Image (spheres, rainbow, N blue to C red):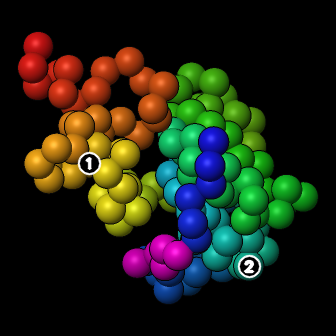
Amino acid sequence: MTAVPVRHVPVLADTVARLARGRVRAVDCTVGAGGHAALLLEAGAQVLAVDAAPAAVATARERLDPGVATVHHGRFADPAILEAIQAFRPDFILLDLGVSSHQLDSDARGFSFRPGIALDMRMDPAAARTAALVLNA
């Protein structure tokens, strides 16, 4: 899977940096391009990162130091991911919910309503149902 270009600047960067001070173990449940996770690492935390999008996981694995960050592919509500989070014993959990600008900008992701673009809208391309299948069922 091709990594996502790292050009995204987290909107909540200052807030996350402030809240993360003094934290030891942090979980980023929607790691995306890794911006928030990088801030958590800079604050001195160990990070467990999760994302449903394979491209985001590839980007996070390239960007984050594997010595202090572990990146998982999956949904943060999956039982195996929840077990990993529980075993990690975090003192800070971040969920930056929603789609990112790179997902909206990528025709291949299908989050656009532009003519001629397939309506996909899956965070994980391996997921069974596209938005088009749901809407046209």
Of 46 and 127, the residue lying toward us: 127
Mark closer to the chain start, 1 or 2: 2
Residue 127 in which image quadrant: top left
The location of residue 125, given as percent across then percent down, is 45, 32
Give the amino acid at mark 1: Phe
Residues tagged 1 and 2 counted as in contact (Cβ below 8 A): no
> In the image, 11: left or right of 79?
left
Give the amino acid at mark 2: Glu
> In the image, 53: left or right of 92?
left
Q: Is the magenta stretch mostly helix, strand or loop?
A: loop
The location of residue 12, given as percent across then percent down, is 43, 77
Locate the N terminus by quadrant.
top right
> In the image, 59: left or right of 67?
left
The residue at 57%/66% (across/down) is: 5
* Residue bounds of the magenta highlight: 7-11
The location of residue 41, given as percent across then percent down, is 74, 71
The residue at 72%/78% (across/down) is: 43
What label does residue 63 carry, if any?
A: none
Of 4 and 20, the residue lying toward us: 4
Q: Mark 1 points at which residue?
A: 111
The residue at 26%/48% (across/down) is: 111
Of 35 and 3, the residue lying toward us: 3
